[in-house]
Image (tube, rainbow, N blue to C red):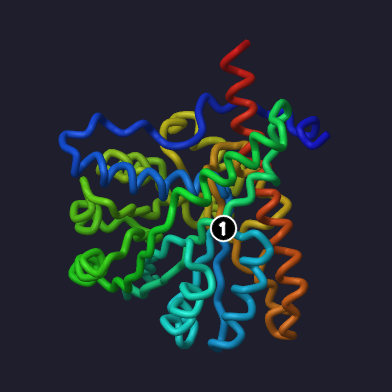
Amino acid sequence: MALARFSFCHRPSLGFPTPAAPLSSRVSCSSHRLNTTLTEINNSGVIACLRANSVELALEAAGAALTGDISVLEVTMSTPGVFEILQELVQNHPRKIMGVIIFTTSFGICMPFVFVLVILVDMETCVWPYDSPESRHKDSTMLAGSVSMLMVGTVLNAKDAKTAINAGAKFLMSPVILKEIMDDVQGGEVLYIPGAMTPTEIFSAYNAGAKIVKVYPVTALGGTQYISALSKPFSHIPMVASQGIKIDSIGEYIAQGASAVVLSDAIFDKEAMGQRNFNTIHELARLAASQGVKAVEREKWCMLNSSIR
């Protein structure tokens, strides 16, 4: 049984902090929508990051990943015709959340990254030891039917971020902390995930209002051991692990404290992309999605099991 392979149910918590009581119905509505986005990321456990050199290649690869059960797909702005790609993905996959990733290069130049969060979670892949197939099907139907939000935007700086938000963007993410954007989204519907490297940066981002923080570049910092070390003092801070993560390490990252991981070449294999081998991409996506959901559900079971001991 898959559960038997994992003995580390050490985390006191998984998921996202309970938001403060709403001050008004408007804030309550905003909080609900923001928490819906948080929940979708938390449930998937995997964010697939796609880079391609043409519209056709990107669409084929995205389709292979989405039909492989990937529920969170990021298409980088370095991909030619990214907005044409997003438009077609919107038409083909209408139940989704779209947002913006802000990327700052080592030269201090901000580059926009856009991704699509597709709300098509198959709860049949979840591992709940005492759940019935009927209850899992009911949960899947409720989840898929309750969320249908469209978000789009391209952000180069705080001014562009405001423009994107006004245009309907619901999601912003970067490998660094951009305080001006953090301030702009406070109390609204838009989720901003700042990037952080050190414990001080992670805590500062959370203290400034971040609901979830991206730990980057995680592999260079020690991988799962680094996440494990961070989760001890920061078990209350949801973290997304990003950079150089492989499919076979998804479970350990989530078990050690990450809420989700970002996968790039692990799904969109360079050789497969070069050969346009979409069957391989589809199978890698299916494996990654399955591993992500199972890892998340395993942690939920660990939490439940710990709470009733």
Q: Which residue is mark 1?
A: 71
Q: Secondary structure at mark 1?
A: loop
Please provide percent x and percent y for residue 1. Answer: 83, 34
Q: Is residue 98 above or below residue 195?
A: below
Q: Nearer the viewer, residue 261 or 35?
A: 35
Residue positioned 24% across, 39% down in the render: 28
Q: Nearer the viewer, residue 234 or 139?
A: 139
Q: Residue furthest top?
A: 309
Give me the residue at 49% from left, 82% from top: 79
Q: Residue at x 33, y 42 (%)?
A: 32
| 173 or 296: nearer the viewer | 296
User: In this view of the protein, which residue sits in the foreground, 52 or 231?
Assistant: 52
> What residue is at 18 percent from the left and 70 percent from the top?
159
Q: Is 114 situated above or below 240?
A: below
Q: Which quadrant would the C terminus be assigned to in this image?
A: top right
Amino acid tagged 1? Ser
Q: Is residue 50 left or right of residue 3?
A: left
Q: Position of residue 176 (x, y in %)?
A: 35, 58
Mark 1 surroundings within 10 Å by alpha-carbon count, few (fewer than 14), some (14 through 19), many (20 or more) = many
The quarter of the displayed image where residue 194 is located: bottom left
Q: Position of residue 100 (x, y in %)?
A: 37, 66
Left or right relative to 18: residue 278 = right
Horizontally, residue 162 falls left or right of residue 99, namely left
Q: Position of residue 4 (x, y in %)?
A: 80, 30
